[in-house]
């Protein structure tokens, strides 16, 4: 059994160009590798070489080409992408990709939202009877909100990726499905932000991006942690279900309080 000369972990019988454990390039060490089959429509990455992630080879490819190739591969061939993605190698590059592509998508979504509120007014119609509140909400939801989100989007995205990866990894640990460390989960969560480009689609982009992001999380976690997609889906969907239940409970309490106040006034 061949060992990686860098991290000393065992390599699979048909290895790729990059170690699946530490992400090191195996070619200079003389390790013989057999590239995995490339699905139709996908390209060899990292400068035309099999294995690796185009974004992590942006020094050779260029930032724009690496960004485009990585996004295309994640969206079009997620199982193939996450299967050959290095499971280690640092979180800086994946986080940088998530922030960059996420910023583009969030700015686009904020721009569409600003236009919508500029034309249709505030999203809370019950404030229309109070013009001062309606005007303030229209400004916040409109162009002021767009500027704020454009400036602070990198911070929001960074926090969101860390929180999301932490929740997913915790769920995987609870389900007994975590075969790798937090960094592998973080890398999946970061590269799954490729769905942010779908926010460029007006009106329906938010829904499409949300659904496809969930799909990418499930596929990526299953491939990286070598677990079933059922367990990966549970790790992704159970927190969402819990959040929905909490929001529903809060809404029910608010509605019950409002109904009680209304009935007391009638009495």
Image (cartoon, helix red, strand yellow):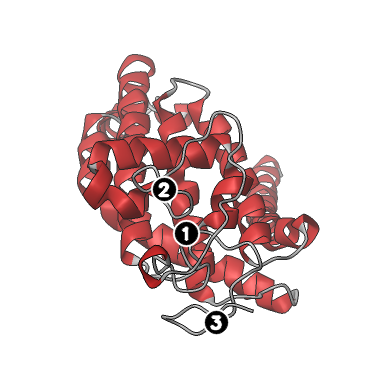
Marks 3 and 2, Cα distance to the nearest angstrom? 22 Å
User: What residue is rendered at 52% in x and 74% in y?
Assistant: 182
* Residue 17: numbered disc: 1
Q: Residues within 10 Å of mark 3 (few under 14, many from 20)?
A: some
| Image quadrant where residue 37 sits | top right
Task: State the count of labels.
Answer: 3
Query: Which residue is farthest bottom?
Result: 8
Q: Secondary structure at mark 2?
A: loop
Marks 1 and 2, Cα distance to the nearest angstrom? 8 Å
x and y percentages locating residue 123 in the rendered image: 44, 29
Q: Secondary structure at mark 3?
A: loop
x and y percentages locating residue 53 in the rendered image: 42, 52
User: What residue is rendered at 27% in x and 43% in y?
Assistant: 61
Task: Name the N-terminal-most of marks 3 and 2.
Answer: 3
Task: Name the N-terminal-most of marks 1 and 2.
Answer: 1
164 above or below 263? below
Q: Residues within 10 Å of mark 1 (few under 14, many from 20)?
A: many
Marks 1 and 2: CB-CB under 8 Å?
Answer: yes
On the image, numbered disc 3 is attached to which residue?
A: 9
In the figure, is residue 225 to the left or right of 5? Answer: right
Q: Quadrant of the N terminus?
A: bottom right
* Residue 49: numbered disc: 2
x and y percentages locating residue 156 in the rendered image: 34, 55
User: What residue is rendered at 60% in x and 30% in y?
Assistant: 40
In the figure, is residue 233 to the left or right of 43? Answer: right
């Amino acid at each position: 059994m061949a060992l990686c000369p860098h991290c000393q972990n065992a390599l699979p019988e048909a290895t790729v160009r990059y170690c699946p454990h530490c992400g090191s390039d195996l070619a200079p060490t003389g390790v013989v590798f057999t590239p995995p089959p490339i699905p139709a429509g996908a390209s060899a990455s990292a400068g035309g070489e099999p294995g690796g992630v185009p974004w992590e080879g942006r020094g050779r490819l260029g930032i724009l080409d690496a960004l485009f190739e990585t996004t295309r591969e994640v969206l079009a061939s997620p199982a193939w992408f996450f299967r050959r993605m290095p499971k280690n190698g640092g979180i800086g590059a994946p986080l940088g990709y998530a922030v960059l592509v996420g910023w583009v998508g969030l700015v686009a979504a904020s721009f569409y939202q600003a236009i919508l509120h500029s034309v249709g007014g505030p999203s809370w119609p019950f404030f229309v009877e109070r013009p001062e509140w309606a005007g303030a909400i229209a400004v916040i939801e409109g162009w002021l909100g767009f500027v704020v989100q454009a400036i602070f989007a990198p911070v929001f995205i960074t926090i969101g990726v860390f929180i999301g990866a932490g929740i997913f990894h915790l769920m995987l640990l609870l389900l007994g499905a975590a075969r790798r460390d937090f960094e592998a989960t973080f890398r999946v969560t970061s590269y799954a932000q490729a769905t942010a480009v779908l926010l460029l689609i007006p009106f329906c982009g938010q829904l499409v991006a949300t659904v496809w992001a969930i799909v990418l999380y499930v596929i990526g976690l299953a491939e990286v942690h070598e677990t079933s997609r059922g367990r990966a889906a549970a790790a992704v969907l159970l927190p969402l279900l819990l959040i929905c239940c909490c929001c529903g409970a809060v809404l029910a309490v608010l509605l019950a309080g409002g109904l009680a106040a209304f009935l007391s006034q009638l009495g």
